[in-house]
Amino acid sequence: MKTDSTTEDKIKEAAKQVFIAKGFSGCTSREIAKAAGMNVALVNYYFRSKSALFKIIFEAAMGDFLLSMLDVFNTSLPLEDKLRNYLDREYAFLTKYPEIPSFIINEMGRKEGVHIDNTAVFQCIEHTGIFEECLMEQKAGRMREIDITSITLLMMSNCQFPFMGAAVIKQVHALSDEQYEKQLVQHKQIVTDMLIGYLFPESKSTQITQK
């Protein structure tokens, strides 16, 4: 039987929506087939199993999630500019795909099911030299001396939580979707000023912002 790329793409798109909504353990191949408008046999013909299909979807989501980060970190810009650009592109990506962080974090924390080795993926970040660059800037006195893990936590929490926690924040403050979208535009600038100001206290751009 000859494979059809259109059919394959349709199955992958349906699987992506189902996996993001329910996770690997919360859905069946039958549900994916139904979402794609096909039968289970056809889904299994193209992807062999739910596990194999999940691996493809998860790795694609992880790749999309890290792409802008790697693009920015691989540039020759000064570190402060890299982090500003990273924050800008991260908010742009999460505005378009707000469900991706929860999907990745939930599935990486799952104890059972498909095991995916993400070592190579995360090594790509290390290979950009961004961690060494932070240490060099700290040693030169241009960046606040805090450990790399804390920097990662600061970046991740301030970028991803506004999207992962959107439903709670909107309910607490009685905000519509449109109001919250406008709030996020403002919040991105607040986060950028706050993080850059904290990490680079002697920066001229930080001092201008504070004035």
Image (cartoon, rainbow, N blue to C red):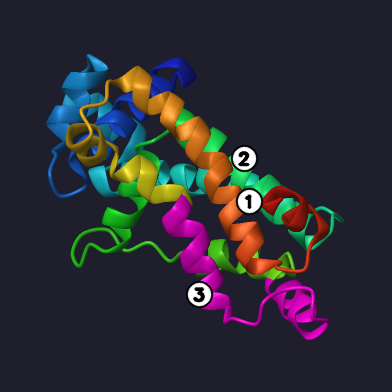
Label 1: element kind: helix
Which residue carries the number 2 mark? 89
**Mark 1 and mark 2: Cα distance apart in space:** 8 Å
Amino acid type, label 2 = Arg
Q: Residue 166 magenta-drawn?
A: no
**Between 20 and 113, which is closer to the camera in this rendering?**
20
Residue at which label 1 appears: 69
Figure check: 161 above or below 181 = below
Task: Give the quadrant of residue 141.
Answer: bottom right
Position of residue 108 relative to residue 129, above or below, is above
Residue under the image location 70 percent in, 49 percent down: 209
Q: Image quadrant of residue 123?
A: bottom right
Q: CA distance from mark 1 to mark 3?
A: 17 Å
- The magenta-colored residue range is 131-158
Q: Nearer the viewer, mark 1 or mark 3?
A: 3
Q: Residue 26 at what x, y percent from top left?
A: 12, 44
Residue drawn at point x = 37 percent, y = 44 percent: 162
- In the image, residue 120 lies at what x, y percent? 56, 66
User: Residue at image x 37%, y 29%?
Assistant: 12
At 28% from the left and 44% from the top, the residue drawn is 165
Disc 3 marks a residue whose amino acid type is Ser
Which amino acid, by three-letter code, is at mark 1?
Met
* Cβ–Cβ under 8 Å for marks 1 and 2: yes
Choose mark 2 or mark 3, whichever is in front: 3
Q: Earlier in the sequence, mark 2 or mark 3?
A: 2
For the view shown, which residue lies furthest in the right direction? 76
Residue 158 locus on image (x, y percent) = 45, 53
According to the picture, the residue beneath numbered tag 3 turns out to be 150
The one of 128 and 156 positioned closer to us in this rendering: 156
